[in-house]
């Protein structure tokens, strides 16, 4: 959809960075043109450069995790499920566990200065339920790092931010994670 001018979060990332180039490198240089993200997999892309639209000389490098959420419209996603699918929540949770494990495995050092940015993945064009997605993120992030540990998954990151272009979606995340809406950061240029 990026090539057709869509303005979802994923496409906005591609417009303001070299992420699309990195995705093409995965597809054509590593997978001979036949690659797609596995159902329970993700791509960890290091050093994606973000550009500030008003000043292209100002940029930031970040790592990105690309994953494919289920397309509940059953139209154009990599992985399609119906809204009535009995294992939808457990499969989505498994995807989120993979994303968090990838972020943890690729964090520098002890996770200090590591900021994890998450959001309502799949809740736009793919029509996943925002409340369900927020609850699944909360479940994964509050689970123990391993069965012998009281340390939670979220402790591997200094900060976790939830981003969305829609206030109603952020409000759902704030409620599920018991966050104070007054502490919400407002968007500002990088």
Image (tube, rainbow, N blue to C red):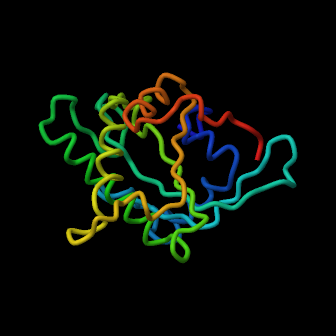
Query: Which residue is at the front of the view, 104 or 79?
Result: 104
* Residue 169 position (above or below residue 70): above
- Give the residue at x 22% y 72%: 148
Q: Position of residue 161 (x, y in %)?
A: 54, 46
Q: Position of residue 153 (x, y in %)?
A: 36, 60
Residue 82: quadrant of the picture: top left
Which residue is farthest bottom?
109
Q: Position of residue 173 (x, y in %)?
A: 43, 34
Count of numbered labels shown in the rendering: 0
- Give the residue at x 33% y 31%: 128
Q: Position of residue 48 (x, y in %)?
A: 64, 60
Q: Is residue 179 left or right of residue 128?
A: right
Q: Is residue 164 left or right of residue 125?
A: right
Query: Which residue is at the front of the view, 142 or 31?
Result: 142
- Give the residue at x 28% y 65%: 150
Query: Which residue is at the front of the view, 79 or 120?
Result: 120
């Amino acid at each position: 959809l990026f090539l057709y001018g869509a303005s979802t979060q994923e496409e906005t990332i591609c417009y303001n960075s070299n992420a699309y180039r990195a995705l093409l490198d995965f597809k054509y240089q590593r997978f001979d043109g036949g690659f797609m993200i596995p159902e329970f997999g993700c791509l960890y892309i290091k050093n994606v450069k973000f550009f500030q639209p008003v000043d292209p000389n100002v940029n930031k490098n970040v790592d990105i995790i690309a994953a494919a959420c289920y397309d509940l419209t059953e139209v154009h996603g990599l992985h399609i499920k119906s809204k009535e699918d009995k294992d939808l929540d457990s499969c989505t949770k498994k995807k989120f566990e993979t994303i968090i494990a990838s972020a943890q495995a690729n964090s520098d050092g002890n996770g200090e200065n590591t900021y994890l940015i998450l959001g309502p993945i799949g809740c736009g064009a793919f029509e996943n339920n925002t409340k369900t997605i927020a609850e699944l993120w909360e479940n994964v992030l509050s689970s123990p790092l391993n069965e012998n540990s009281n340390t939670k998954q979220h402790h591997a990151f200094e900060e976790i931010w939830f981003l969305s272009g829609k206030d109603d979606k952020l409000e759902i995340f704030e409620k599920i994670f018991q966050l104070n809406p007054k502490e919400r950061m407002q968007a500002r240029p990088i």
